[in-house]
Amino acid sequence: MRLLREQRGMSLAELARQAGLAKQTLSTIEQGVGNPTVDTLFSVANALGVPVTRLVAEREQVMVVQRRDEVVWQRHGGYESRSLDHVYGSGVIENYLLRIAPVAADGSADPSAPHPVGTLEHLYVISGRVRVGPVDSAVELGPGDFVRYPGDRPHVYESLDGESVVHVVVSVPRVQPGTGAVRVPRTHGERAR
């Protein structure tokens, strides 16, 4: 909440006034001590001009796997949508379509180099079977499966049966946790050393 408030140049008092809440209530929430009600969250979100999910979205770098048989498609008139993932924040977003060659005869693939701290990769399998993710916790996926994993560690893209095609979205935060602003390099095509 503090980040969103500061991005808008709002003082705690101004946010409290616009949300119709006590300044102390907001201070407690920003310190991570309070347990706000749903009504309080909606008031704050409205005052900040953001969806309430921006205030309660997970911030950890956890792996999220979505299997095709576990998803819900939603109909919207003439089309259906499948939500893959929601991650909020600012930074650089890169989209890639990857064609992954079969794993070498010795069964090894060169790991991809870690990207800047805080980077997440979101990968959706279009065709083929793949093994992807951090070197120490890669998962096997098939067509229609989705995974999100930390991209700031060495990670692999391996095709398990012929050429595979995947869609990858790489999200790199503009400000690296604890470091301030950094130049964000292109993320793919680099190999781990």
Image: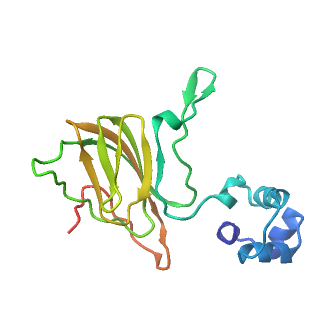
In depth, the one of 137 and 128 nearer the eye is 137
Whole-percent x and y of residue 55? 69, 60
Camera-side residue: 144 or 167? 144
Residue at left offset 23%, top offset 41% = 160
Q: Position of residue 36 (x, y in %)?
A: 80, 65
- Residue in the image at 29% along x and 38% along y: 129
Residue at the far top: name it.
78
Indicate the quadrant where residue 126 lies: top left
Please name the residue shown 22% across and 61% down the image.
191
Work out whether residue 11 can be spotted.
no
Residue 50 position in % (x across, y down):
70, 55
Judged left or right of residue 78, residue 137 is left
Numbered-mark total = 0
Quarter holding residue 10: bottom right
The N terminus appears in which quarter of the rendering?
Answer: bottom right
- Residue 138 makes an appearance in the image: yes
Up/down of 10 relative to 92, above or below: below
Residue depicted at 20% across the width and 69% down the height: 193
Q: Nearer the viewer, residue 88 or 162?
A: 162
Residue 185 vs residue 158, the one in the foreground:
158
Q: Residue 44, position in %: x, y? A: 79, 61
- Residue 6: which quarter of the image? bottom right
Q: Is residue 97 left or right of residue 6?
A: left
Tell me if residue 135 comes above or below residue 183 in the rendering: above
Query: Hey, which residue is sitting farthest left in the picture?
Result: 105
Going by the image, does 125 lie left or right of 102?
Answer: right
Image color mode: rainbow
